[in-house]
Image: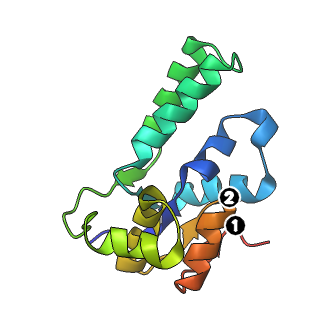
Amino acid sequence: MMTYHYVLDCSVAMTWFFDDEYTASTDALKEMLRNGSVIVPTIWPFEVANVLWSTERQKRIKPYQSEKIKHLIQKLPIEVDNHLESDPLGNTLELAREYDISVYDASYVDLSLRLGIPLASLDNKLRTAATSAGIPILPSY
């Protein structure tokens, strides 16, 4: 089994491509990709696509910029977890109930717990849930 640095939330990844969202702490997480890879739940590519589409609709970026970001993301060592150990109607739903988060967010908690690795997120509710589950959070403040 491959070793990953952390589970990557869309909220962190998008800071890498929008200057007005850049932070030194999330840039440090991107730098970690030079020496390995990260993993994301199956929902992640949909979340990224939604952010790109939303920013296009808000006129923050043009479609060609969205395509450029898409291609840059595809070159990063990010693996989508396609394993069947995750059970959205079972464990993931239970985690959503336990921590009062969306099932989508619970998929990040589930993946971090299954692999025993930190979660990189800027989403406060997700960070709180992961902390309650005993998952180390990145970036640390």
Left or right: 120, with 91 as reference point: right
Dot 2: what SS?
A: loop
The residue lying furthest to the bottom in this view is 134
How far apart, in angstroms, are the residues tagged by discs 2 and 1? Answer: 8 Å
Position in image of residue 121 (x %, y %): 62, 61
- Viewer-proximal residue, 23 or 60? 60
Q: Earlier in the sequence, mark 2 or mark 1?
A: 2
Q: Which residue is mark 1?
A: 139
Residue occupying the point 69% across, 44% down: 15
Position in image of residue 104 (x %, y %): 43, 56
Left or right: 120, with 81 as reference point: right
- Viewer-proximal residue, 2 or 101? 101
Residue 67 seen: yes
Q: Which quadrant, please, contains the C terminus?
A: bottom right
Q: In which quarter of the view is residue 9 placed?
A: bottom right
Position in image of residue 50 (x %, y %): 50, 33
Q: In which quarter of the view is residue 82 placed?
A: bottom left
Q: Which colour scheme appears in the figure?
A: rainbow
Checking the image for residue 45, the label placed there is none
Seen in the picture, residue 89 relative to 73 is either above or below; the reply is below
Residue 75 seen: no
Q: In which quarter of the view is residue 120 placed?
A: bottom right
Seen in the picture, residue 93 relative to 30 is either above or below; the reply is below
Dot 1: what SS?
A: loop
Q: Which residue is mark 2?
A: 122
Query: What is the total number of numbered labels drawn onto the structure image?
Result: 2
Q: Amino acid at mark 2?
A: Leu
Q: Amino acid at mark 1?
A: Pro
Residue occupying the point 65% across, 59% down: 123
The residue lying furthest to the left in this view is 84
